[in-house]
Amino acid sequence: MSDTPPDRLSVNPKSPYFDQALLQRGIGIRFKGVERRDVEEYCVSENWIRVQVGKTMDRKGNPLTIKLSGPVEAWFESPAVGEGEGEAEA
């Protein structure tokens, strides 16, 4: 099994691209060559990220976000459960 993150992932629980198990592993995002920690949602194949605009909220109380376009790289920050143990023994 390959250890690559999904093409698209969101931190918003209301999004269809939300996955708590993957987020708990930790996802690293590099956008235009700079590692970012403020990404709300990303899509590698479409080359965009969505980030929050300050502390501004929309009328429903959700953070206001903007979409930035550019090259996106994603990786897991920790191995999957059980995968790290097998590599250490080999």
Image (spheres, rainbow, N blue to C red):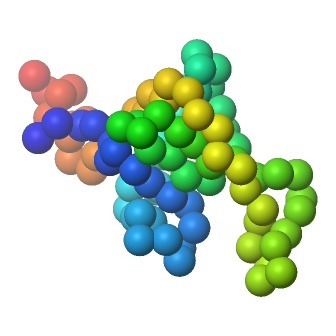
Residue drawn 89% across and 59% down? 55
Q: Is residue 2 left or right of residue 14?
A: left
Q: Is residue 60 above or below residue 53?
A: below
Residue drawn 40% across and 50% down? 8
Where is residue 19 shown, x and y percent of the image? 40, 64
Q: Is residue 90 above or below residue 39?
A: above
Q: Quadrant of the C terminus?
A: top left
Q: Is residue 33 left or right of residue 22?
A: right
**Can residue 4 be seen?**
yes
Residue drawn 83% across and 81% down? 59
Location of residue 37 (image quadrant): top right
**Can residue 76 be seen?**
no
Towards the viewer: 11 or 43: 43
Q: Is residue 63 left or right of residue 6?
A: right
Towards the viewer: 69 or 87: 69
User: Which residue extends farthest bottom?
Assistant: 60
